[in-house]
Image (spheres, rainbow, N blue to C red):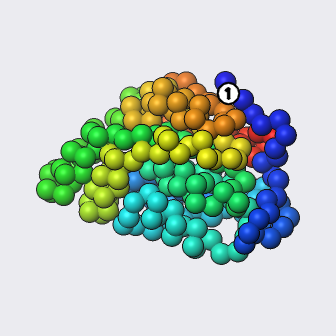
Amino acid sequence: MGSSRPTRSANAIRSGPGVVNRPEAEARWVLLHGTPLTPRVWDEVGALLAAGLPVVAPALPRPGTQTEIARRVLASLEGTQALHVVGHSFGGQVAIEVALAAPLRLASLTILCSRATPFPAFAASAESLRRGDPLDVQGSLARWFLPDELAADGPAVRFARACITGADRALWADDLQAIAGYDRAGDLGRIDAPTRVIAAQFDGVGTPDEMQALAGAIPGAEFVLVPNASHMSQFLDPTALAERIAGTSRSLR
């Protein structure tokens, strides 16, 4: 589904004020994690992508809004390298902000299981965290994985569980509050880079309908629906996920 830009290469080198011409060899992947996850969620995927280009998977510099975090991420990426930006969940919204803030450096954009419109239900979740209510670890995992994936209790599930139980509650609450009010639907048309929007069939926040609307608002973006998957299911198969991500820079030309 979706379309591609027939005259634009994802590896094209942009030029403009403050940007110098540079070889694609200087490009890099930037992998942005969700909340309350850590950059380790990208370890296996990043190792596969690194076969083609260098990979940076920073810890999101919080607290702050998605816009503030994106600016700090960009400030940490010294130089003028072209950026293939990938974001999952909350990181997907930060990726959108990176795309809007640095269009001349953006080589491609991949958004996984995220959204560009408010999700008000998360405001109550943020308040619960701030009150110190008991964490519903199993409930969170059930929203992120399918029942059979939870039953198998593989490395990705164990990692997610550890992230929940070890989360900084204040930072997590700030992130959820930011997601509750995030709205960039009216600005997505400004993104002018090869873009792939990857949705999971059973994701309850970055729903397929929401993600398809997001893709439809970005000129030339491609929408990919992964069947029989939930919010974090794709991390159970790093090879397949790396292939979907790499396709953003390889096939949208």
User: Relative to 76, is 86 above or below?
Assistant: above
Mark 1 is on which residue type?
Gly
Q: Position of residue 19 (x, y in %)?
A: 75, 69
What residue is at 48 percent from the left and 40 percent from the top? 185
Residue at point 61%, 38% (across, down): 218
Q: Is residue 213 above or below residue 75?
A: above
- For the question of whether residue 128 can be seen, the reply is yes
Image coordinates of residue 29 in percent, x first then y, are 68, 58
Give the position of the N terminus as an image quadrant: top right
Q: Relative to residue 178, is residue 57 depicted above or below?
A: below
Is 239 in front, or is 85?
A: 85
Q: Nearer the viewer, residue 59 or 110?
A: 110
Q: Residues within 10 Å of mark 1 (few under 14, many from 20)?
A: some
Q: Position of residue 167 (x, y in %)?
A: 32, 59
Determine whether, in the image, residue 168 is placed left or right of residue 200. left
**Rendered image quadrant of residue 4:** top right
Residue shown at the point (51%, 62%) measured from the top left: 70
Q: Quadrant of residue 253?
A: top right
Residue where numbered disc 1 is placed:
2
Left or right of 124, for residue 100: right
Looking at the rendering, which quadrant does residue 122 occupy? top left
Task: Count the numbered circles shown.
Answer: 1
Residue 88 in view, yes or no: no
Callout 1: helix, strand or loop? Answer: loop
In this orientation, which residue lies closer to the viewer: 19 or 230?
19
